[in-house]
Structures are given as structure tokens and as C-alpha cells.
Amino acid sequence: MTTPFSFSLHHTDGQARTGEITTSRGVIRTPAFMPVGTAGTVKAVQMRDVEATGADIILGNTYHLMLRPTAERVAKFGGLHKFSTWKGPILTDSGGFQVMSLAQMRKLTEKGVEFRSHIDGSKHMLTPERSIEIQCLLGADIQMQLDECPPFPITEEASLESLELSLRWAQRSKDAFADMAGPHQALYGIVQGSVFEDQRKRSAESLQEIGFPGYSVGGLAVGEGREQMFRVLDFTTPVLPKDKPRYLMGVGKPLDLVGAVERGIDMFDCVLPTRSGRHGQAWTWDGPLNLKNAKFVDDETPLDPDSDCPASRDYTKGYLNHLFRAGEYLGPMLLSWHNLDFYQRLMAAMRAAIAEDRFAQFAAEFRARHREKS
Amino acid sequence: MTTPFSFSLHHTDGQARTGEITTSRGVIRTPAFMPVGTAGTVKAVQMRDVEATGADIILGNTYHLMLRPTAERVAKFGGLHKFSTWKGPILTDSGGFQVMSLAQMRKLTEKGVEFRSHIDGSKHMLTPERSIEIQCLLGADIQMQLDECPPFPITEEASLESLELSLRWAQRSKDAFADMAGPHQALYGIVQGSVFEDQRKRSAESLQEIGFPGYSVGGLAVGEGREQMFRVLDFTTPVLPKDKPRYLMGVGKPLDLVGAVERGIDMFDCVLPTRSGRHGQAWTWDGPLNLKNAKFVDDETPLDPDSDCPASRDYTKGYLNHLFRAGEYLGPMLLSWHNLDFYQRLMAAMRAAIAEDRFAQFAAEFRARHREKS
């Protein structure tokens, strides 16, 4: 458990990069997509099957876990890895984003954010220090600073004020992390600044002065739209250090991933593949399919006969349609699994294209084929 | 696909028996427990994992499948095996029991039973001939005659009248089966007669005059209670032929299985392991556990460290408790799997005890240890 955290950049093709993050629990091939295991489980998929898709790392949510079963209880069980049976690296968020989107009666101060649990109304305080403490109790390999994720749209003044608070919290997070974590763990700073170029630059530069082994891009995929998100990445990744991993939080759809990798992003997480899967939507090279649609009722073809994933290869679309119509558990189970597998195959295809200096061609072909509305 | 159906009795210990049913899709070790795959899926468990528990055969429900996706559609997909990906033998019921318990506006006549679907209100007619036709469209290896499963309690007169109807339907089922099925398939007759010894005897003898390769005991586990059920078995199995398999339909809890095997039953099916699993109840050698109970919140032990089943061995009770509290899919998935595995281990233990002429001792020890209320 003493391998120190490190990042090695392997190859660059335009802005797109391949590399490897080494952790004490295994190597993460980048660009990487992290399945979301909100409450200690990747919804409706066994960890064995998540692993088989080729996922190198999963994400856990501090907010959900601190409320239930509590970080202290997870620590008593030996940490989130042992609790959930996931053996590879785990990244945790700071809890801040979900406090702002899920919790009740939030009160934000310099100290942190006070809120009531959406589960039982209990009162909690999340500070930069408490967030790090929780993430260390969970045993997260990669941790996030507490930040304020401002709403979109936001005025320049309000964004700047929020950004400055996040920077002060970044320093406090780093100090707490130095006290509580080990060299096998890493803390990322989070770049904020909404859609404002000077603010993104100021955030990225200030975070680098504090110094982190990885940088997240936060505050995107909050309603600004794909073009705006790409525009922000266009001026944000160039001001991030080349030798550190870059993580675009909470993104996204396949076309988002391709466009963000094209702009130099190394890591992603999103609930979309599992959430879509629970609702009958399958992601494929050609775009999403709504398996509940009557047109699939007699379809004898699988989602992908060339896949190694049983969920993609062994069941007909007609059977999946039947499972969703009958409200059977197996429908969400199989489609969540399939979607996670598709996402990993997309990442693997992107890594291969970058390694062979043909990423632009790959991206163009993918965009030509992949229709978001089916 | 041409291995004919056959039954071979291996060993008898008291009334308890071990044997093997040979089908074109594999051997069924008896006494056997059949997981229920109502609508083409064993709820919340992958077929791969059902198979790994040691289940030799699963059950499909004619009523559910005839309504959705329809037997004709399943046939177009190549039959229920191919549709569901289950490669071993499948037994189907006749649909009669569920028509009486689930369907709307039922009208029973000599011809059959007319009803409206509980799903969409559509009108259907189930006759002995149509039931066999559906079971053949599904491709069931073992099929059931259409019978009337009378309510409990019932008067002797009403029971006798129902029994006579079921006997006439038995002959019609056999005739239809002879027209439609092959030698690799088998049709069982169903013994009725409620709790009346002379009626059970009359039913069993009349069915043998018609002649079936297997006999089911129907009309039990409908509210008469365990002692009454055992009393009926005490006088029913002795009037069934020794060289044919005996199937007790819709049973039951572990103590039911042990008591029925003790009375000469060879086959069982029940939704209990999967239904219990979906509701947080784990069956164990010591009895059922309600994993939702607060007492498990800090329990770091698995359900069974000695099991080969990942669901029983690799997850703590505290984690399972967390999954149910958080409403996660993985809770039902793991507990259904565990329960199916426990049921198969119980059957394997009974088969071993019979083979070694120590079934009475096994049953006594099981009863001493297994507490139904935990």
C-alpha cells in the first residue's frame, strides 16, 4: 500500500493525451472513465462485472456515504474498498456538489456549508477539513478539495467571489490532507470560474501555486451546453500543467467525452451510463437506443455481437424490451452493465487512436456515426 | 435434442429418494429445487449465477409468458431457452393456477377458463389443448396438464367435482401433448383432492390409468398449513408409482422441503428464495434473517463464509443492510442469489444424506437448528 501516487504522460496527439496514473491499488489508463458508485455500489451492476468492463477506477460520493452508512462506519468496515468489495483505486468527490444539489436548508459560510440531510433531516457541517477527514475515513485513493460549485448562469462578480472562496478552501484542503493522508493518496484542486476566461486562468494559476498532483475542471455540465463547455475547455486546459492529470467532473455523453479528450482531458465520471441503463436507454456506437420502444419487440439482434460483454452480446433487443415492459430487475441490470462496457470500449478506442496519432480521424468518424437522438 | 425423457431412482432411505431425471437438455438431480423464472428471468439474478448455484432446471410461468411477450413471440425467438439464455431444462406450469389467482373476470367451463389479462384487460381462453400448445411453443422440457386448483378450505362435494374436471382435462392434455410434443418432452399429471384421503387416492389412481411420466401434487401450500400438508403427503405419495418423479408444486420454506423429501417428494419450485431476497430476507441454516434489521448495521460477518457463492461469502451483513436501507438494486440482487444458493445447498445436503442412509438424522438436526422466526 505504499506505492506513491504518480502520473506519467505517454503520448500526445494534438491536445489529446494518453498516460497512466499509478496508485497503490493499481494503474489507471488515461483517458479514463470512472463509473459512479454513489453509495458504495455501482447501481444495478456487480463489482465483478464493472471490473470486467475494463474500468480501472470507480467514484464514490462523499455526501451519500457520510450520511449513510456514515464515513466512520465505513472506516470500521475497513474502508470503502473492503466495504464494497471494489479492489481497484477509488476517487471520492468532496461532497460539496451534492450538498448544494440534494441537501436541505443549506447555509454557506467561510467556514464551510451547514445543511440538513435529505434522508432524515439531520444537521451536518461540511468544511474543507471535514471533507478530507471523511475521504480519508473512506480510504479514497484520489480525493477532491471542497469547493463551491456555483450555479449557471452567474454574474462575473458572483463567480469571482465564489472562486476566491474555493481557492481559500483549496489551501485549507491541502493543509488538512497533509495532516491526514499518505503518499499513496492524492488530492486534486478544482478549477472554477464559470465561463469566464480570465477567472478560469486565475483559478488554474492560483491552484498551481498551492500545488496539487492533479487538477479537476469543475462547474461545467451544469446547463451551459456542449459548445460553451468546449469553449471553456479550449482556454482552460492550456493553463493546466502538462505533467498532471486533468479531470472533467460529472461529464458526460459520448460526444462530450470525445470532445473533451480532444481538448486534453484525462479523466471523467458520470452517472449517465447507469442512469440511462435503469431507464431503458442503451448507448451504442450509433447513438442511444430506447429499448422500451415497440420497434424492438421482435428484434432478434443483440446490442453488439462483437462485444466480449455478455450484456451486449448474449441477449436480444427483443428480450431486453420484454424485461423493461415486464418491469424486471434484469433489464436495468443488463443495460447498466452494457452501457458501462460501451463507455470503457469508447475510452479504449480513444486511447488507441491517440497512441497511433489518429485521434482527429477517430473523432471525426465517431461524430459522423454517433447520432445523439435515435 | 433427441434424448428421451426418463427417470432413474438411485436410492431410497425411508420414504426419501434420490434419483436423476434425464432430459435432452441435461440431467436433473433429485430431490431438486427449481428456481422460478416467472417471465423469462429469475428475478434479479443473472442466469449465469443461477447456474452456478447448482440449479439443474428452472420453471417458467405459462400465464405470464402467454400474456407478455406471448408464446408465439417466444417461439419466434427460438423458444424460452434461447430467449432467456437458460440452457438447462425448463419446466412450465399449465397457467391454470395463476389464471385463478391473478387474472380478472374468470369464467370456468368444461371447455377451459376464459379470463381477462391483469396487464391490459385483453380477453383470453385457456383450455387443456391451448395450454399444451403454449408450453410447446415455449419449448418446455417438462409440461403440466391444465387443472383446476380449488381454494382451501373446500367442501368434499366441491372438491370432488373439481377433481373430476381436472381428470377429464388430464386426458385432454395428454391427447394434445401426444399431437404436439416430442419424446424429449414430458407431461406430468396433477393429483388433486384437497385434504381428502379418498379423493387424493382416486386422483392418483385415475391419473395412472391415463399414464404420465411424472406426477405433481397440486392444491397444497394454499393455506392449509404445514401439518395438514404433510398429512396429505403421508397418504398421497404412497399411492404414486415409485418409478416416476413426484413434484410438489409451489413449495416452499426450507422446513417444508425437508418434510416433503422425507415423505417421498422429488421436485419443488417456489418463488420464496427470490421474493424473500427482494425484501431483505436471507435464508440460512439457522433460519431466516431480516437484513434490514438495525442489529446488522455494524455486522462485519458474511452470510456464510464457507459458501462458494460470492453473494453468501464476499459481502458483510452490514453492507447488505446498507444496500437495503439505501434502496440499492444490489441488495435484492445479492440476497436473491444467496437464497437460491442456500436452497441448492440444502437440496445437495439432502441428496447426500439420502445416499448415505442418514436422512432421518439430517432432518432431525436441520429441524433442531433451523428456526423459522429469527
Image (cartoon, coloured by chain):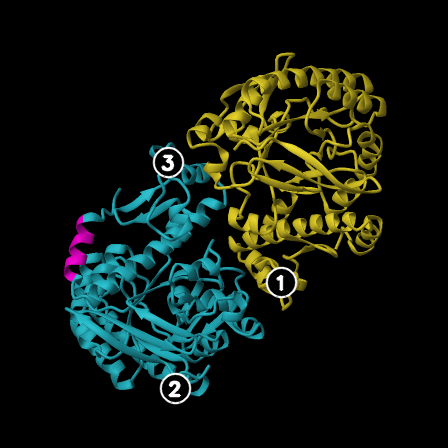
Chain colours: A cyan, B yellow
Discs 3 and 2 share one subunit:
yes
Extreme residue toward the top, this view:
B110
Span highlighted in magenta in the image: A360-368
* Closer to us: A309 or B320: A309
Q: Can you identify the residue that label 3 sits on?
A: A300
A227 displayed left or right of A107: left
Q: How far apart are marks 1 and 3 (CA)?
A: 40 Å
Q: Is the magenta stretch mostly helix, strand or loop?
A: helix
The residue to which callout 1 is attached is B317
**With respect to residue B199, does B246 lie above or below?**
below
Q: What numbered label is drawn on residue A175? A: 2
Percent x, y for residue A167? 30, 79
Q: What residue type is labelled 1?
A: Lys
Horizontal side, residue B85 vs residue B161: left or right: left
Task: Determine whether the residue tagged by mark 1 lies in a helix, strand or loop.
Answer: helix
Residue B182 image point, x, y percent: 56, 25
Q: Is residue A159 magenta?
A: no
Measuring 26% from the left and 42% from the top, which residue is drawn there? A374
